[in-house]
Image (cartoon, grey):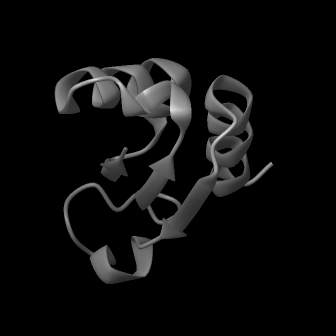
Amino acid sequence: MAVKDEIEDRLTAAFHPSVLEVVNESYKHAGHAGDDGTGESHFHITIRAEALAAMNRVARHRAVQKALGDLNQRVHAIGLDAG
C-alpha cells in the first residue's frame, strides 16, 4: 500500500475528519537529505476534525503523530495543518 493511502486510512480511522488532504511533496525534495528514492518521503497533511478542534496546536500535532504511529519513522518529513 502506498504511504499516502496508509496516512489517509490511519487518520480517517482515528479522527473521522470532515476535511483530509494528503499531498505527496516528495518530488520537491528529490536529491535532498531524507530523499530515499522511493518518492514517498515528504508529505503535507491538511486535516479538520471535530476531535481535534478543542485541542491546542501542540495537542493536535501530538494526536496526529500518535495516529500515524510507525509512519513517523518511515517518512522523512510531514507538514501538518490541523484543526
Residue depicted at x 33% and y 47%: 76
Is 13 located above or below residue 46 in the figure? above
Is 44 located above or below residue 31 in the figure? above
Disc count in the image? 0
Task: Give the camera-side residue of 67 and 57.
Answer: 57
Quarter-of-image position of residue 61: top left
Residue 9 placement (x, y as % from top left): 74, 40
Residue 82 placement (x, y as % from top left): 36, 45
Quarter-of-image position of residue 49: top right
Q: Report if residue 57 is visible in the image.
A: yes
Quarter-of-image position of residue 16: top right
Residue depicted at x 44% and y 56%: 45
Task: Give the camera-side residue of 16 and 25.
Answer: 16
Q: Report if residue 73 is visible in the image.
A: no
* Quadrant position of the C terminus in the picture: top left
Residue depicted at x 74% and y 28%: 13
Specify whether 71 is left or right of 16: left
Specify whether 15 is left or right of 56: right
Is 42 located above or below residue 14 in the figure? below
Is 26 located above or below residue 34 in the figure? below
Residue 32 placement (x, y as % from top left): 21, 70
Residue 71 placement (x, y as % from top left): 52, 32
